[in-house]
Amino acid sequence: MLNGIKIGNRSVGSEHEPFVIAEMSGNHNQSLERALMIVDAAGKAGADALKLQTYTADTLTIPGVGRIEDKSSLWYGNTLHELYQKAYTPWEWHAALFERARTHGMIPFSTPFDETAVDFLEDLGASVYKIASFENTDWKLLQKVASTKKPVIMSTGATSLADLAESVRVLRDAGCKDLVLLKCTSSYPAEPFESNILTIPHMREMFKCEVGLSDHTAGCGVAVASIALGATVIEKHFTLDRDEGGVDAAFSLEPAEFHNLKVESKRAWQGLGEVMYETGEKESKSLIFKRSIFVVQDVPAGQLFTAENVRVIRPGDGLKPKHLSEVLGRKATKDIKRGTPMTWEMLR
């Protein structure tokens, strides 16, 4: 049984409501003003944490390589360098964004994409680190992040089980004690049928750590469903308005949608409860709507109980309906008024 972990001032685990992360990514469209507005909106929508991405186009790739040829891609025709130049969050914005997030009670953190980004985020007081799916086999980066001794959240998209097992071992060997793995489908946007969230309990059992979902599907249905499978962390991309565009806008939630995710994920978690077949305290008040055996005509002592003077009706104050055959044909032990719930003491 996992006991959960601490991320900043928040306890994360099955005993606590889901930890819901708003991912800004590149939806600021290279405007600091818009980025700050996104932080404010995420805070008002109820996000527990705000996540950035810390890289530059030059720390990820070089110009002229890796042109995106998939015509169905949101980013078709761009080279990787061109895409990341549009999407990156300037490092000089990070301090202001972290501070603004904290004013809303959110935990600010980021995904570093190289070792220099880890050093930079350490200086900003990051309390947790995220490893992106496409970096989760970069052992040097994993070792650098783990060496901070901070909790690590790692997405598992585009990764085999064997590679994932190696990456988890690398993190733990390098000092990571508190790990969250996020089931992730690295397509943008993803379709619900690609999500395979039944992997979540298997992953939790295999790696003995907290598990959640990094979700690129539309809406919040898949994310809410994941709670029932044991997800304790949910990450969704966040934007002010999809119609205003942005590199990730097509698979991002708007503020009202994100608020709905926060509310419904908490309800899903509350609904888990425990294995229980007994009537709860509040539910017991509904027993009035159950059926039971009642005397429906006045019956003098010694008279037989028949289908005319005994019926199965609401409320549930008398003998259970299954006993009707044991009642019919027996005699009353005393005078019984119409509307009396049947008891064994009335029978002889």
Image: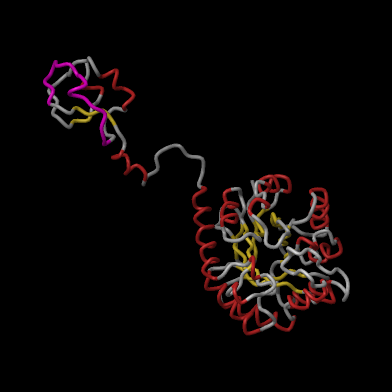
Where is residue 289, by image quadrant?
Answer: top left
Above/below status of 270 relative to 303:
below
| Residue extending furthest toward the front | 71
- In this view of the protein, which residue sits in the foreground, 93 or 197? 197
- In this view of the protein, which residue sits in the foreground, 33 or 136? 33
Boundaries of the magenta span: 298-315
In-image side of 248 versus 281 (left or right): right
Q: Does 309 lie within the magenta span?
A: yes
Residue drawn at point x = 29 percent, y = 27 percent = 319
Above/below status of 343 relative to 186:
above
Magenta stretch, main secondary structure, is loop
The image position of residue 36, as x and y in percent, is 61, 81
Q: Does 146 lie within the magenta span?
A: no
Where is residue 302, by image quadrant?
Answer: top left
In-image side of 62 versus 31 (left or right): right
Above/below status of 31 relative to 6:
below
Residue drawn at point x = 57 percent, y = 61 percent = 219
Where is residue 322, by image quadrant?
Answer: top left
In-image side of 242 versus 71 (left or right): left
The image position of residue 266, as x and y in percent, is 52, 57
Colour scheme in use: secondary structure
The image position of residue 287, as x and y in percent, is 32, 39
The image position of residue 68, as x and y in percent, is 81, 67
> How many badges with numbers are in the image?
0
Quarter that holds the C terminus: top left
